Amino acid sequence: KKGDAMLPISETGGAVVMIKNLIQASKEKSKPKKKERWNFNTCPHEQFEKTLDDVFVSFLMWARTEGEEKNINVSKAFRRLEQYADWMEDSKEDLADPLTPDSVWEVLQVWNMKGSIDKHGRFAWWVTFRDMDAKKIKEIDPKDHVRAFVWYSHYVMFDPNAQENGIIFIEDCDQVGFLESITL
């Protein structure tokens, strides 16, 4: 967008400082309830031995410009981080209990999601209908599905290939009809 703050890719540390300053400015002008999002209370970064700075770097990496001059669009990264913070805050009831591998393992096994790296170095997140247990999916509390997907999305978020080259999400419906697929 016109007027967005840009920094050279070599200035990632400075971009993290800018993100922190934007968060602080947002806190200062937000109503108390909106300020809560910036606490990142539901973010499971520590489960991955990461810090909030690592979360910020993920968003900065995904806001790089293409072309000859590689820059980080800090404003774009912040807009995406705001949406993430809102989403995580909106999901706080489902995420009240800490997200750990053990807490989501059973649901992840039912979904049987996979990850791989494609020929362009992108992280490929696979959901294949024929590999999931549709019967068990229906038996699991919807809150637990949210928890599993939040945990797995953070697993993907911290993957070096995902940060450097991006993510593709592949859903193989295995000739499952529309109605069946939306009523899993």
Image: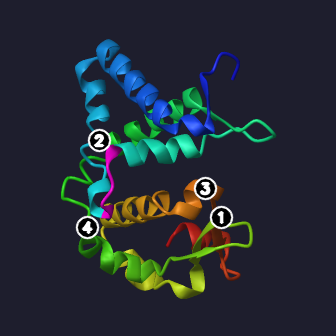
Q: Residue at x 76, y 35 (%)?
A: 69
Q: Earlier in the sequence, mark 4 or mark 2?
A: 2
The residue that mark 3 highlights is: 164
Q: Earlier in the sequence, mark 1 or mark 2?
A: 2
Asked if 128 appears above or below 15 in the picture, the reply is: below
Q: Residue at x 31, y 32 (%)?
A: 38
Residue 40 is marked as 2
Depth check, mark 4 against mark 1: the one in front is: 1
Residue 166 in sight in this render: no
Mark 1: amino acid: Arg
Q: Which residues are magenta?
A: 48-52
Q: Position of residue 68 (x, y in %)?
A: 81, 39
The residue that mark 4 highlights is: 100
Mark 3: amino acid: Glu
- Residue 166 is a magenta residue: no
Residue 131 in sight in this render: yes
3D distance between C-alphas at marks 4 and 3: 25 Å
- In-image side of 147 versus 179 (left or right): left
Helix or strand or loop: what does disc 3 sit on? helix
Q: Residue at x 37, y 43 (%)?
A: 53
Q: Quadrant of the N terminus?
A: top right
Q: Residue at x 48, y 30 (%)?
A: 14
Crowdedness near tag 2: few (<14), some (14–19) or many (≥20) residues, C-alpha within 10 Å: some
Asked if disc 4 and disc 2 are in contact, CB closer than 8 Å, the reply is no
The secondary structure making up most of the magenta span is: loop
The residue that mark 1 highlights is: 122
Q: Position of residue 127 (x, y in %)?
A: 57, 74
3D distance between C-alphas at marks 4 and 1: 25 Å
Q: Earlier in the sequence, mark 4 or mark 1?
A: 4
Crowdedness near tag 3: few (<14), some (14–19) or many (≥20) residues, C-alpha within 10 Å: some
